[in-house]
Image: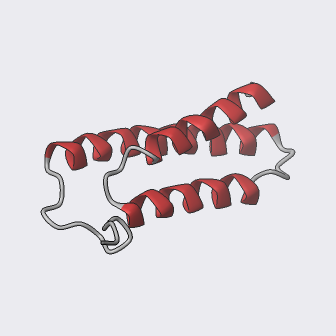
Amino acid sequence: MVDKGQVISLCRSLLRAGRQYPDYNIREYAKRRTLDGFRMNKNLTDHSKVEEAYAEGKKQLEVVERVVKVYLAYPPKTKNIMELKLQ
């Protein structure tokens, strides 16, 4: 059975993993998608659905961590406009 602490830990882990993306747009998308997903499922009461949502979140965390490694190994050649410093 999944308790509230595990869910909060998963949310924080997803947010932390999303912050590692070098691209601003992907960082913001990961943050938005994580928060939206947890807000959408916050009213789940059926234990099987909670377990299912938690398992899906764990799978998404593994995907994010794998993709971050690829992005860090092969960073984009150009910076996003949001990442450029004003002169």
Query: Visible in this render: residue 40?
Result: yes
- Work out whether residue 33 or residue 83 is closer to the camera in this orientation and state it: 83
- Work out whether residue 24 or residue 34 is closer to the camera in this orientation and state it: 24
Colour mapping:
secondary structure
What number of labels is visible? 0
How far from the left and from the top, in percent, is residue 24? 39, 62
Kindly give the residue lying farthest to the front in the view shown: 87
Which quadrant of the figure has residue 53? top right
Query: Visible in this render: residue 3?
Result: no
In the rendered structure, the answer to whether residue 25 lies left or right of residue 74 reads right
How far from the left and from the top, in percent, is residue 70? 21, 45
In the rendered structure, the answer to whether residue 63 lies left or right of residue 41 reads left
- Work out whether residue 27 or residue 5 is closer to the camera in this orientation and state it: 27
Which quadrant of the figure has residue 1? top right
**Residue at point 49%, 57% (across, down):** 30
How far from the left and from the top, in percent, is residue 26? 39, 61
User: Is 6 located above or below residue 41 in the figure?
Assistant: above
